[in-house]
Amino acid sequence: MSPKTETAPESLALRVLRAGMPLLLLAVLLLLPLGDIGANRTKVLFLTFVWICASVAWNILGGFAGQASFGFAVFYGLGAYTSAVAINGGINPYLTYALAAAVATLASLFIGLPTFRLRGPYFAIATIGVSEAVRVIMTNLGFTGGASGYRITEHVPFRQTEHYYTGLALAALAVAASILIRRSRFGLGLRAIRDDQEAAADSGVNPYASKLAAHAVAAALTGVAGGVYARYAAFISPDGVFAFQRSVSILLMPIIGGVNTIWGPVLGGGVYGVVEEELSARFPEFHLLLYGVLVILIILFEPGGLMGLLGRLRRLILRRRVGAWQPS
Amino acid sequence: MTFTDYLNLLISAVLLAGTYAAVAVGMTVIYGVMKIVNLAHAGFLMLGAYFVYEVHERAGLHPLLGVALAFPAFYLLGMAVHWALGRGIPVSDEPTLASLLLMFGLWLVLQNLGYLVWGTSDRAILTPMTFATLRYGEITIPKIGLVVFVSAVVSLVALEFVLHKTWFGRSVRALIQNRYACRIVGVHVQRTARMTFGLGIAFAGTAGGLLALLFPFSPDFGRPFLLRSFVIIVLGGLESFSGVFLGALILALVETFSILAIPSSYQPAISFSLLVVALIVLPGGVAGILARKRRLA
């Protein structure tokens, strides 16, 4: 009996496990509110879902297409404010999320049309500028209350489980979009742009249009995330949703989890969401310090992030098992 | 507005430009040689401010002496950082995302170390000079602004001298032009890169100290100046040192005179909008346009 036939069913089991695990996770998360997990834990999970959505969205542009942006707070904030204003205007909350997506997409085109003429780091730098400019404008904008923030008043009772499921659906939607893009021709084009823009252009990919499209999809998802968050929080301010810190968080999650993968940003968002809630209240500086150190270590030693680390661990275990086969 | 009002605005713009140039030059040096967009620049500006503050408060030294001390201290610090992160910041031909993110991580670390050590409250360095002014009839010049301007110009002139009259400076300029040719003629690329990184950080620390004389500061102090440095470098054409002066002057003039047209609460948006416009319209910077004109003529 050769080792190959022996390992084949195992790899099938692994494949089933890998395909089944996300579904299992989804099922567990769907059933979780039925058991009494407490308001606080529900809140942490809800916020984590919102983070995961933004993280996965960032990865579509920053990971798949390799265009790191420091300006995703713009979409998050615009989504939040759009939903907030629309909900106060009496529109169904779920419809306002579509509005938030539309506004964020428009903003992404407005930002992308000029800045995607720039490459790599210049695009990243330009997004810092855009993000700061938008924050300053929103701080001074009269009808949204300017720096003092904006309050949402809904005349329906607050139901946390509804928010929980909205958040879960949002995160699932983002992951689904990410998987679909990854497997599509469009996603292949983005990867080609990431690897070599000239070569991609030569083989028939339009880098400019593809980047714009990826930016738009990412912005729409981030905008909805902002809207969902705003409805939950019921109070938003430019210093919260438009903060540079918000852009930084959205960028950190996929990098920590593993950029340019499907599950890396989910993992990163999950870790970030939970750690943020546990740590940031008690040690706000320490928690960002930790992320800074993590980013440095990841860039220096494991550019694949947590996913890369897991892959390394798996290979180590598999090799040991193969090694056990060899002596016989 | 009278003529003297305009003149006063012009003077404050020029004084501001000197400081801005000192802030941006450290970033330019590092970008020129290593093609690294040093986001951690903001963190080192902040550290420089606190360095001068601590030297002034604890050792009782004059803040300007502290600024002078910051230069060698931050030079060594920069070399140490380059040594520690060496494998992540190679000398490359074009800016990489990895080095950008690495520097961003470093900035996060520095900024939050700042919060841990000094807390969130604003500090300021006050000397008898702080509120003093020189008056010539209708024209007033803030004394501290003048002192900072002169220090900035002195350090920039010293840098020009080093770049043009020493072997280190020649190898720096050669590295900016062509890395491979440098190796062929025997420039030690790694060592020059390390010294350049040290030099860039030294300028960041010194500039931070100078800024601390003008403005109150907190651990988040560097961020607006980081963005202004981008504007200046982009306006100045990313790799030229004389361009830095020009970029700083343009930014300072726009910021100062925009008060006449735009409400001051929108003022922070100006430099950032200018950054985006400059990145898109002037990829070679103002100096690049001049160079192109020269080539055509």
Image: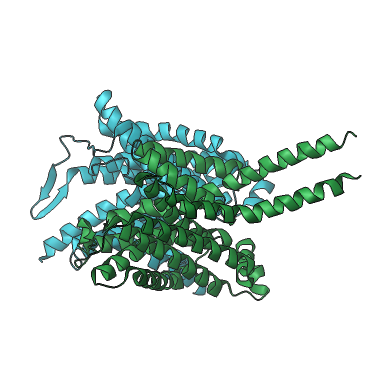
Chain colours: A green, B cyan
- Percent x, y of residue B116: 34, 33
- Percent x, y of residue A230: 32, 60
Name the image quarter holding the C terminus of chain A.
top right
Report whether A50 appears left or right of A65.
left
Residue at the far top: name it: B59
- Percent x, y of residue B155: 37, 42
Q: In the depicted view, which residue is nearer to us: B135 or A315? A: A315
Name the image quarter holding the N terminus of chain A.
top right
In the image, is residue B114 above or below residue A141?
above
In the image, is residue B108 above or below residue B76?
below
Can residue A33 be seen here? yes
- Percent x, y of residue A249: 42, 50
Report whether A260 appears left or right of A166.
right
- Name the residue rendered at 18%, 43% in the picture: B143
Report whether B86 appears left or right of B142.
right
- Name the residue rendered at 27%, 24% in the picture: B58
Residue at the far left: name it: B137
Q: In the depicted view, which residue is nearer to us: B36 or B109? A: B109
In the image, is residue A114 above or below residue A171?
below
| Count of numbered labels shown in the rendering | 0
Can residue B273 be seen here? no
- Name the residue rendered at 32%, 62% in the picture: A133
- Name the residue rendered at 33%, 31% in the picture: B117
Q: In the depicted view, which residue is nearer to us: B92 or B11? A: B92
Q: Residue A82, located in which quarter of the rendered image?
A: bottom left
